[in-house]
Amino acid sequence: QARHRINFTLRSNCTVTRLVVEKNKISAVEVESGGDMFRVEAETVILSAGSLANPKILMLSGIGPADNLTSHGIKPLINLEGVGRNLRDHPQNFVLAKVKNVESLDPKSPRLQVGLRYTSQNSAHTDDMMMWMGSYAVSGDYRDILSSNKSHNQVQPQLTGIQITISLYLGTSKGSVALKSATPDDKPIVNLNLLATESDVNRMAEGVQMASEIMDSSYLTDIVDIRTSPTSNILSDKTKFHEWLRSTTTTGNHLTSTCSMGTSSNKFAVVDENCRVYGVDNLFIADASIMPDNVRANTNVTTMMIGERLSASLKSHG
């Protein structure tokens, strides 16, 4: 097993503060752990911190959009305009209903049991939408109701009914990640920019309308008491409906594409076809941040394959 190899060390509770760039190579990784600072030197460095942390680490290291770096007093070492741009996600919204018998809901049952993949009307892409029927809905985070480590003083979420989740799997809106400051402890500024395009709003509206009709259908009359969100008043007014969608649509936690792969002619590309960061000989990125666009599925398997592909490439080149 890998963990027993003598040339392998796994350290937890470590925060990468920056990469040390010298002559277009990473000479070391600067790390903080328990208040101590130290450097790790390596011939090859692979960054796998995700679509929010990767841009932050690169920019703190002087790799990224020169104007953003300069504004925080960071000397631009490698100007890559695409770092932190093109943030993609799978936006979600929900249709909620109160049930006639809340005691019938089982929070220990699989929460999502039935899924529908479909193509929205007038879409340029097939299978661009997903919809799931949820076994139950709660007043807070559903994960808290399953937790065995509950504080006596903690207000536990309550079962409230059932829900249908609508998710846009091929959105056209793009967000961004930028530095808040040059201090590594500061979180980056994240702009999800969900439903920023007319196409995204219209497709989400169609999905929520469809899910509302399902929730109101005669097939669920033995279960559903009343649909609670969105209300019929919102659905009947297009302006109110679209405003409601923009204010309530949230992240699907499938963030990608802030260090996109692309050709050298693409000024917003961050890595090449071998996952190597442009302008840095020994720095690679292997996670969902290098996807040029989001995928029509959960991102975990694609991310695993990116890691496998880079591993095979590095092994084949010695």
Image: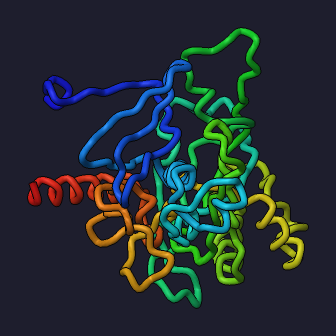
Which of the image's four quarters has the C terminus? Answer: bottom left
| Residue 89 visible in rendering | no
Residue 193, image x and y in percent? Answer: 70, 66
Q: Nearer the viewer, residue 47 or 289?
A: 47
Q: Residue at x 72, y 30 (%)?
A: 158
> For residue 234, what is the image quadrant?
bottom right
Q: Residue at x 56, y 43 (%)?
A: 135
Figure disc tally: 0
> For residue 274, what is the image quadrant?
bottom left
Q: Is residue 152 left or right of residue 40?
A: right
Residue 278, image x and y in percent? Answer: 38, 68
Q: Nearer the viewer, residue 193 or 5?
A: 5
Residue 91, image x and y in percent? Answer: 62, 62
Residue 12, image x and y in percent? Answer: 41, 25
Q: Nearer the viewer, residue 3 or 88?
A: 3
Q: Is residue 7 above or below residue 65?
A: above
Q: Is residue 77 above or below residue 311?
A: below
Q: Residue at x 36, y 25 (%)?
A: 11
Q: Residue at x 71, y 83 (%)?
A: 198
Q: Is residue 293 left or right of residue 194?
A: left
